[in-house]
Amino acid sequence: MSRGREVLVRAVLTVAVVGAFVAALLASGYQWDFRPIWKYRGLYVEGLWKTLAATGVGYATGLVAGVFVALARLSRTLPVRHLGDLYVEIIRGTPFLVQLLVAYFCIAPLLGLESKFWIGSIALGVFAGAYIGEVFRAGIESVDRGQFEAARSLGLSRRRTMRHVVFPQAFKRMIPPLTGELIALTKESSLLYVIAFTELSFAAKQVSSRTIKSFEAYLVVAVLYLTVTIPLSMLARRLERRLGQSARSGVEL
Amino acid sequence: MIELKGISKRFGDVVALENVDLHVAKGEVVVLIGPSGSGKSTLLRCVNALEVPDAGTVHLDGEPIVGGAPDIDRHRAEVGMVFQHFNLFPHKTALENVTLAPTLVRGADAAAARGKAMELLARVGVADKRDVYPDMLSGGQKPRVAIARALAMGPKAMLFDEPTSALDPEMVGEVLEVMAQLAGEGMTMLVASHEMGFAREAAHRVAFMDAGRIVEAGPPDSIFDRPAGNRLKAFLSRVDARR
């Protein structure tokens, strides 16, 4: 199928699905009223801003943590490798909600940390670090061993081999999954509402209870999340295509 | 130039090399022949410490090759290696593949390194491919760039690990030609190969390996025309039958 045709088919289908959804909502007999919601737009704006800020700080923290996790898991020293494995197992084996509550109720008081923003963001970062670390590790391990040997055979040190030969190749392959992690983290940040951090989903809850217009309040928040995640996933797809790993080159069912 | 003494290497329970001695003199071309898994590659890889032997010593130009990082890097820089699958750096152009090590390891000035690299690419007949990435090089061009990349470090000796076995048959000849030319210029070469024709014409000495040992070694005509042992005879008849 040509590219132009594919875009057209996709556009038509999107309009049809969204249209059907809207039609169903309108036909449900529910009295839609977005005016009270509009009154509280300030809460949404604040919520969106805080969602972006917490996700941003969390992702940056996660990238740094991920580098250490990957280095640890690829280390030649067993104890270091084991610590890396342990971190990943613990973080991936427990729900983020539980990690957040532990951070908020157990760890933060011990450290005298009070800012919900920082507690939430760092918890997101620690969480993301395990997943991002795995992306880094998989990326590095995906580089053929022959590349490493070729560089070493030319007299490049281990460090230079990593920097000039292995990392540049690994990095290209990491970009699409790293974008995926950012999208996942944006959604994960909605859990910060349980510590009463006034991010987007907390805002929706507040608007809902103040206006008693739950449908509208949550519909708006869903659309706001999509305005963040859809451009990101489009970006991811573009990067993927540019890196020549088009999804279409695979097997079709 | 290359002196291997009493080299043994096992991978788990598998004996890859068993007490192997081999001496390659300066300017000499030695071709290792033998069935797959006989230890040819492992022996080559011991010369530049890509494999560390369990026992035995490796000397290069009179100096022992031993563990430590800076020493081993210096030794490796003095031995060029061409791999079976060439292992060109896919994120770098042909020219950048050649200039990478001289600029990083030798600290060569960028313009000088490019000049030298162009000279080498021209010598192996791929000067027009300087800005092409390895993915876009043909089967016969890849090994040439790999040879230029190894030569760029000004090595004292070159190792070739079955450089033609991954090639389409029609590409083999031109690559062997480049290698023969290199041999003719007096390069010290240790080559693992299944190309008996090349071994006969370009080698000063041929060593037949089987089950981790050098079973017979000598000038090509004596190895090919007057094989002594049964294993070499059997190997040669199998190789002949394939052509």
Image (cartoon, rainbow, N blue to C red):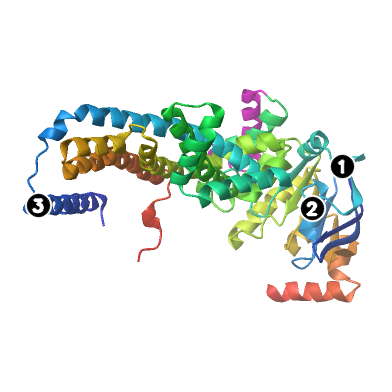
Left or right: residue A247 versus residue A12 is right
Element assignment for label 3: helix
Q: Are marks 3 and 1 in contact (CB under 8 Å)?
A: no
Residue A167 placement: quadrant: top right
Query: Hey, what amino acid is under mark 3?
Result: Ala
Say few, some or many: other residues with alpha carbon within 10 Å of mark 2 (under 14 / 14 to 19 / 20 or more).
many
Q: Residue, x 27% and y 42% (percent of image)? A: A226
Stretch in magenta: B109-132
Front in this rendered view, residue A212 or A10: A212
Q: Which residue is mark 2?
A: B44
Residue B127 can be seen in this image: no
Q: Is residue B46 above or below residue B40?
A: above
Q: Which mark is residue A23?
A: 3
Quarter containing the N terminus of chain A: bottom left
Give the residue at mark 1: B66
The answer as to whether the residues below labels 3 and 1 share one chain is: no
Q: Amino acid at mark 1?
A: Val
